[in-house]
């Protein structure tokens, strides 16, 4: 190739071969650490971990110690916050968000109304007073009219034409309440509490004077009967009996329910005292609730006084509870014969009226679910009274137990098993009386016990077993008397 020399740089291009290239690179074998210590030093020298390589670089020991402490503090802070976030994540945190939605169409709520008066006294008969007189505070000790009730009773409660004008005002009802020669009806023929309140309670046909919903007339047919602690109550828009639920488009006057009621205050029970079932109040109790829950009107209801117009405005609030692990509620529906959806309000009466331990006997108030299986027990009134009743098993057995009233009385009744057995126990009244009755087993046995009245009396009856046996015990009256009757 010719060369150019005049005032220029000579550039000659030559082909390059691999053999002509020699580099001063380190052999590959020399870059691999021979031991774990060398690998660690190589990592600490080239790592980008904050502060860690400064601990092992050459320098003064105070500088290395400062970097070491800083690194350990940062590492501890990292683990602390990381564990805190992990625990927070495992706790299933819930974010609550509440917002208001203006619905264009809402289901009108159920409205339950109850008269403050439990029942109408003029409809009561002697068996009704015998069944309900105790818990109404009408009857006192030994089935006698209480003094406060006697002062409050007026003529007209019993329409007896034989009553004269010179008799005290409580004489007509006093004759009805005289149980000296009254034989209680058999247990199977006695009305249940539901039947009693249904017949003696206030009727909607008599109370309702005016009813209008969204401008349209309504009547007693739009109300369904329900029993609460206030007795016979009525619910509007309950959705029962396959009735369609009413809806509302807007609020305000004229777009809801308007009622005019006659509380029938002249039919109220005489005010002889306030008990759990009777009170000095007059008017109605109202509760607004959903159709899925029964009314809890004694705790959640509000009162409406007679002679006034009351306007009530409400808004619906829905709460959705989360299932585990975010909450304690179960998403699985429960099978129940008493309510369609489970909630605190609907479940509480059911749990209160559950079965007793060791048996299938269920004690329920009249408003509790399963009322048709209920057993009504009369009151035991007194101080430290103790009444223990055992099972009555048999065919056509009849057991009539009267009320035990007194101080520290103790009555223990054993099992009565047999065919056509009859056991009638009279009232035991006194101080520290003790009556213990053993088993009465047999066929057509008859045991009649008269009154045992006194101080520290003790009557112990042994077994009466046999056929057509008859045991009649007379009164045991005295101080520290002891009577023991052997087998007959």
Image (cartoon, grey):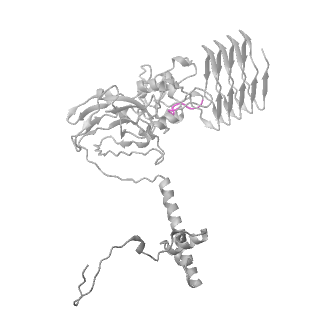
- Residue lying farthest to the left in this orientation: 215
- Residue lying farthest to the front in this orientation: 2
Q: Give the quarter of the figure containing the C terminus.
A: top right
| Of 333 and 341, the residue lying toward us | 333
Q: Main secondary structure of the magenta part?
A: loop
The image shows residue 61 at horizontal and vertical percentages of 59, 83
How many callouts does the rendering have?
0
| Of 396 and 21, the residue lying toward us | 21
| Of 196 and 13, the residue lying toward us | 13
Q: Residue 100, relative to residue 470: is it above or below?
A: below
Q: Answer with left or right where residue 112 lies relative to residue 391.
A: left
- Residue 427 appears in which quarter of the rendering? top right
The image shows residue 452 at horizontal and vertical percentages of 70, 26
Q: Give the quarter of the figure containing the N terminus.
A: bottom left
Residue 230 visible (yes or no): yes
| Of 34 and 372, the residue lying toward us | 34
- Residue 161 appears in which quarter of the rendering? top left
The image shows residue 369 at horizontal and vertical percentages of 47, 30
Asked if the magenta segment contains residue 106, the reply would be: no
Residue 271 visible (yes or no): no
- Residue lying farthest to the bottom in this orientation: 7
- Residue 416 appears in which quarter of the rendering? top right
Q: Answer with left or right where residue 368 lies relative to residue 469.
A: left
- Write the start and end of the magenta stretch as one range: 135-141
- Residue lying farthest to the top in this orientation: 468
Please report the residue visible at 36 percent of the width from the left and 31 percent of the height from the top: 234
Q: Answer with left or right where residue 366 lies relative to residue 112.
A: right
The image shows residue 261 at horizontal and vertical percentages of 30, 35
């Amino acid at each position: 190739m010719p060369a150019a020399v005049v005032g220029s740089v000579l550039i000659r291009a030559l082909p390059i071969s691999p053999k002509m290239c020699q580099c001063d690179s380190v052999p590959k074998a020399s870059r691999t650490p021979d031991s774990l210590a060398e690998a660690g030093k190589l990592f600490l020298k080239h790592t980008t971990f904050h502060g860690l390589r400064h601990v092992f670089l050459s320098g003064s020991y105070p500088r290395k110690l400062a970097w070491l402490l800083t690194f350990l503090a940062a590492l501890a802070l990292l683990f602390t916050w990381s564990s805190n976030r992990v625990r927070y994540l495992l706790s299933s945190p819930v974010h609550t968000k509440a917002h208001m939605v203006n619905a264009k169409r809402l289901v009108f709520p159920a409205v339950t109304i109850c008269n403050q008066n439990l029942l109408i006294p003029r409809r009561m008969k002697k068996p009704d007073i015998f069944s309900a007189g105790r818990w109404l505070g009408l009857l006192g000790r030994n089935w006698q009219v209480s003094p406060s009730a006697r002062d409050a009773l007026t003529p007209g409660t019993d329409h007896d034409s034989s009553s004269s004008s010179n008799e005290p005002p409580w004489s007509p009802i006093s004759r009805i309440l005289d149980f000296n020669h009254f034989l209680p009806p058999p247990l199977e023929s006695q009305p249940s509490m539901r039947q009693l309140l249904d017949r003696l309670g206030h009727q909607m046909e008599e109370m309702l004077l005016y009813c209008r919903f969204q401008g349209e007339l309504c009547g007693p047919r739009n109300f369904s009967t329900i029993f609460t602690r206030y007795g016979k109550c009525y619910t509007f828009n309950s959705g029962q009996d396959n009735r369609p639920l009413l809806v509302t488009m807007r609020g305000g006057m004229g777009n809801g329910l308007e009622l005019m009621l006659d509380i029938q205050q002249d039919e109220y029970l005489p005010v002889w005292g306030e008990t759990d079932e009777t009170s000095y109040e007059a008017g109605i109790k109202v509760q607004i609730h959903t159709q899925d829950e029964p009314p809890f009107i004694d705790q959640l209801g509000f009162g409406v006084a007679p002679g006034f117009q009351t306007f009530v405005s409400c808004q619906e609030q829905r709460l959705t509870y989360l299932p585990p692990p975010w909450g304690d509620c179960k998403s699985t529906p429960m099978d129940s014969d008493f309510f369609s959806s489970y909630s605190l309000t609907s479940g509480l009466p059911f749990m209160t009226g559950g079965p007793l331990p060791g048996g299938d006997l269920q004690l329920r108030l009249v408003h509790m679910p399963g009322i048709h299986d209920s057993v009504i027990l009369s009151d035991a009134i007194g101080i430290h009274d103790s009444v223990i009743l055992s099972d009555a098993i048999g065919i056509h057995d009849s057991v009539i137990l009267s009320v035990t009233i007194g101080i520290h009385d103790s009555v223990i009744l054993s099992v009565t098993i047999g065919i056509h057995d009859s056991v009638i126990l009279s009232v035991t009244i006194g101080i520290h009386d003790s009556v213990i009755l053993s088993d009465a087993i047999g066929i057509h046995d008859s045991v009649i016990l008269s009154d045992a009245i006194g101080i520290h009396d003790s009557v112990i009856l042994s077994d009466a077993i046999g056929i057509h046996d008859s045991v009649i015990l007379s009164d045991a009256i005295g101080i520290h008397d002891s009577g023991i009757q052997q087998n007959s």
